[in-house]
Image: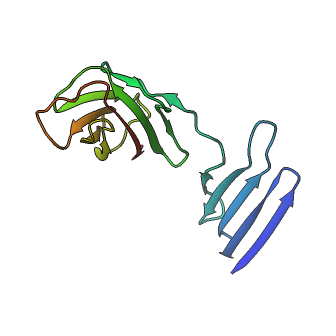
C-alpha cells in the first residue's frame, strides 16, 4: 500500500492506493470568507472515472418555526424543525392545547423536503394532566398527537407537552 500527502495554498489531499489506477483521495479545501472547511472523498477504479462524495461540514442548519395546526399554540420554548447535513429531521415541539380534543389531533404539517421517509411514533406526556401521548410522524408530513392512555377522555386547555423527534429524511 502506498500513501501520499499533497498540500498547496488552495488545499490539499491525502491519497492511498495499491495500484495507482485504483486509489482513494481525501481532499480538503481551506475556509474562505463566510465558509467553513470543505472536504470530499473521491475514489477511482480505473484512474480516469472518479466517484466523489461531499463530507459533512460544520455549517449549522437553518431552523424554521413549526407551522402549528388550529388548536395549538407555542409554549415556553422553541417550536421548530430543521434538517441536518446527515439528512436527519429534528423537530422540537413545545405546545399547549387551545381547544379540547378526544383521542387525537393534528399538531402541524411539515413542508416538502422536511418529511420523514417512514412512519414513526414517539412518546411524550402532557405535563398538566400527566397523560401519555404518542406523537405520530407520517410520511405526508403530518404530526399527530394520539392519546396513549384513557382513550375517549378529552384533553383540555391549557394542557401542554414538550417533545423532540429525530426522523430520517
* Closer-to-camera residue (112/20): 112
Q: Which residue is rendered at x = 66% and y = 47% of the image?
A: 58
Counting from the top left corner in percent of width and height, residue 34 is at 77, 36
Q: Position of residue 127 (x, y in %)?
A: 33, 38
Quadrant for residue 97, please give it.
top left
Is 76 situated left or right of 9 in this image? left
Please state the horizontal and vertical placement of residue 48, each as a whole percent of the image: 65, 59
Specify the quadrant of the image occupied by residue 125.
top left
Judge whether residue 19 can be spotted in this image.
no
Instruction: For residue 100, say whether it is visible.
Output: yes
In the rendered image, residue 164, in percent from the top left (x then y), is placed at 42, 43
Residue pushed farthest right? Answer: 9
Quarter of the rendering occupied by the C terminus: top left
167 relative position to 135: left or right: right
**Considering the image in quadrants, where does the N terminus appear?**
bottom right
Q: Is residue 153 above or below residue 55?
A: above
- Reply above or below: 75 against 48: above
Q: Residue furthest bottom?
A: 1
Residue drawn at 64 percent across, 58 percent down: 41
Residue located 31% across and 18% down the image: 70
Amino acid at each position: 500500500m502506498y500513501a501520499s500527502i499533497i498540500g498547496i495554498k488552495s488545499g490539499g489531499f491525502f491519497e492511498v492506493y495499491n495500484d495507482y489506477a485504483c486509489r482513494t483521495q481525501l481532499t480538503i479545501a481551506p475556509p474562505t470568507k463566510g465558509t467553513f472547511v470543505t472536504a470530499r472523498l473521491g475514489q477511482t477504479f480505473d484512474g480516469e472515472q472518479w466517484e466523489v462524495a461531499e463530507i459533512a461540514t460544520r455549517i449549522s442548519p437553518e431552523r424554521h418555526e413549526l407551522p402549528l395546526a388550529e388548536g395549538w399554540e407555542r409554549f415556553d420554548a422553541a417550536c421548530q424543525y430543521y434538517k441536518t447535513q446527515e439528512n436527519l429531521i429534528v423537530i422540537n415541539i413545545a405546545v399547549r392545547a387551545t381547544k379540547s380534543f378526544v383521542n387525537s389531533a393534528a399538531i402541524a404539517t411539515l413542508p416538502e423536503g422536511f418529511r420523514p421517509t417512514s412512519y414513526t411514533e414517539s412518546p411524550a406526556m402532557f405535563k398538566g394532566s400527566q397523560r401519555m401521548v404518542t406523537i405520530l410522524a407520517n410520511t405526508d408530513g403530518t404530526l399527530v398527537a394520539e392519546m396513549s392512555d384513557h382513550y375517549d377522555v378529552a384533553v383540555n386547555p391549557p394542557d401542554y407537552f414538550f417533545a423532540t423527534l429525530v426522523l430520517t429524511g
